[in-house]
Amino acid sequence: MNDDILKISPSQFVSFLHEQGIHRAHFVWNANSGRVEASHPELEPIARFMDSDPRDFQQHEGVFLQVSREHDTLQGAFVHRTNRGQAAGGVRYWSYDTVEDYLRDGLRLAVGMTRKNALAGLWWGGGKGVMARNPQVDRDDRATRDSLYREYGELMTAVRGCYVTAEDAGTSVEDMAQVFATTRFTTCIPPELGGSGNPSLPTARGVLAGMIAALEFLDMGSIARRTFAVQGVGHVGGPLIGFLLEQGAARIFACDVDAALVRANRERFPDNVELRCVERDDTWIYAVDCDVFAPCATGAILNPATIPLLKARIVCGAANNQLEDAARDDALLHERRILYVPDFLTNRMGIVTCADESAGYVTPDPEIERHLQRDWQHSIHQTCMEVFGASGDSGRPTSEVATVIADRLSMEANPVYGHRGKRIIESLVADAWFRA
């Protein structure tokens, strides 16, 4: 199949894996050879793709794949860097047109988690789970979902904790309970099972903190009397609208591709909010005359086609990987004098809330609340001000500045376990884990 393997759909890729007798597979970075090593020779084209792509592949320590036995669904764990600790990040259940789209999303999201966890001061590395939706599978059927997520938990157990999963887009707390049924390497489990539950509300609070810092830095005052455009009104976007209204926002424009979500939020916010149901490629929300644009849906939405449409002075939202091409699009925003709050800086509160579930709970928890305070050195507010100030002094875009800081922090070794995640991956390869 050669390079064509990247252009087929995930479902076709699953069929190919079945034909080759492959249930599990991996791609692991070999620092000695400077190349990615595939578990199976049939998958060499994917390894060479990773080797040749410096934008999205950044020497990820490992990518682990599994085919669901019951539902022909491609499941994956993407591990970027584990110097600070085991890779941590949520599992996304999403639709992808091609294998390349699937891989790129997982690779990019894992890097984002490395930087997010490092900037937040968490002793966790960066990773991400991705399950590709099979169009032949009813993803709304509870029994089907239970089976899918139990199988995903089996993958977590199989990779021995080098990656610890959590909730993400397309995944619910109920789904995480099923993951927990087959592995200990998960967070965001239901409160009745001792977990922290849905992290959406804390995430929205973190985005709000980033907005407040940006407005203050630009001498634009507070949330009160400002206008906002929110793209996506789901788990985070909806609560964010509520927080903005509580703080006196003058007007909010919002959109989503899900008609049911739009209806629900219209009922919830009848005043001062204009909500539209839009198609995926609709650009109305970008061109809204507002002070702050908040991407809270999918990633890679800021690019040369959309950035020129923006009228906002600030971009600050919850979506991961908002920049389609980090270097190019960061520079475009900077050239237009739009203050970009890097997503991996301001949307940290989901992972902050759930990452250390095993440490127990305090109400309110000072280890969590300090991220939302103004005076803690590593809080969202303080980190924003550090990044904005360094950007202004150096003339470099904000995401570039934040990335340099985060990458430096991400190389620090865990003070207790050292680089244990890498050792786990080495043992997986040595033991041919995929044959189990």
Image (tube, grey):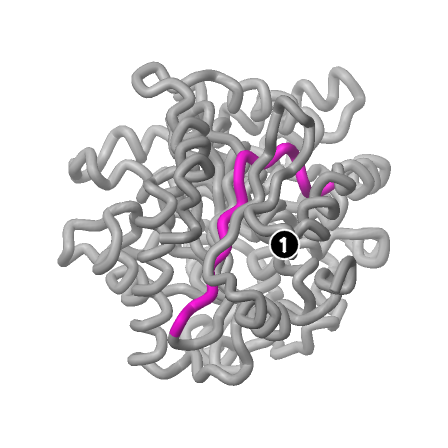
User: Crowding near pointer 1: few (<14 within 10 Å), some, many (20+)?
Assistant: many
In the rendered image, residue 67 lying in the magenta stretch gets the answer yes
* Along the viewing direction, whichever of 45 and 293 lies nearer the viewer: 45
- Compared across the picture, whether 366 is left or right of 31 comes to left
Residue 24 location in percent, x, y?
47, 56
Residue 162 location in percent, x, y?
39, 38
Q: Is residue 293 visible?
A: no
Check disc 1 and report the residue beneath it.
103
Compared to residue 110, the image places residue 70 above or below, namely below
Q: Amino acid at mark 1?
A: Leu
Residue 114 location in percent, x, y?
52, 34
In the rendered image, residue 376 lying in the magenta stretch gets the answer no
The residue under the point 15% across, 55% down is 193
Image quarter of residue 115: top right
Q: Determine the main secondary structure of the stretch shown in magenta.
A: loop
Residues in magenta, as a range: 55-69
- Compared across the picture, whether 271 is left or right of 294 comes to left
* Along the viewing direction, whichever of 21 and 27 lies nearer the viewer: 21
* Along the viewing direction, whichever of 312 and 224 lies nearer the viewer: 312
The residue under the point 73% across, 50% down is 324
Q: Is residue 352 visible?
A: yes
* Along the viewing direction, whichever of 12 and 58 lies nearer the viewer: 12
Compared to residue 74, the image places residue 296 above or below, namely above
The residue under the point 75% across, 30% down is 397
Residue 22 location in percent, x, y?
51, 62
